Amino acid sequence: MNDSSYPQSKSELLRFEGRDEAQAIALLMAQQAKRQICILGRDIDHALFDKQEFVDCISDLARRSPTTQVRILVHDTRLNQQNGHRLIPLAQHLTSSIHIHNTAKQHRDLQTTQLLVDDFAYLSCPRAAQYDGYANLYDRLEVRQLQQKFDELWQQSSPDITVRRLDL
């Protein structure tokens, strides 16, 4: 995998097995994001999305422009909060750019972890917390379909009130 060719001009399905490979691809994708990152999962996956380099990329993206956005859609963030996930305080600080929502009850059976970047790259782990999956750094058609599904889930979701910052 070569960062300089990102985004690629042709679609190439990348299979990965294991946490290290998945982390490397997720980081590469986050480093190249220009407008939007969407994360879907049971929770905010610690192994993929709680590394300082990844969080720094999210911070840079969120601060880049008033139109950039990070949307995180999960079933529950309680474990993330208990374990001190780095994206939560960042979202509490950058409330206009980073949004965390909870899925609607009828979608709580979803077991996938996905990362969508802009309109061309995706990473998917079909079984959450099992880091065997696939990614593509340039597949506009697949990302459009995944983004449409994500947007439908987002429309039915609600803001996660447990991660709101309390100003006293």
Image (cartoon, grey):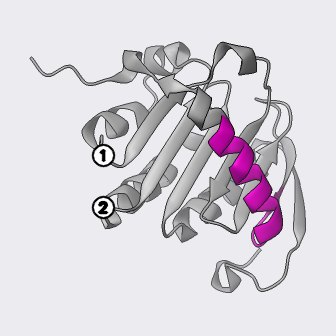
Residue at position x 59%, y 36% from top? 154
Kindly identify which residue carries mark 2.
66
Q: Is mark 1 on a helix, strand or loop?
A: loop
The quarter holding residue 49 reads top right
Percent x, y of residue 113: 73, 37
Percent x, y of residue 46: 59, 32
The kind of residue tagged 1 is Ser
Taking the image as drawn, is residue 135 in sight? yes
How packed mark 2 is, by other alpha carbons closer than 10 Å (few <14, some 14-19, many 20 or more), is few
The kind of residue tagged 2 is Pro
Instruction: Say whether marks 1 and 2 touch (CB < 8 Å).
Output: yes
* Residue 96, numbered label: 1
Q: Is the magenta stretch mostly helix, strand or loop?
A: helix
Range covered by the magenta-colored residues: 135-152
Percent x, y of residue 14: 87, 63
Tell me if residue 55 comes above or below residue 143 in the rendering: above
Spatial CA distance of label 1 from label 2 is 8 Å
Residue at position x 41%, y 60% from top? 68
Q: In which quarter of the image is the N terminus?
A: bottom right
Residue 93 appears left or right of 114: left
Give whichever of discs 1 and 2 has the lower sequence position: 2
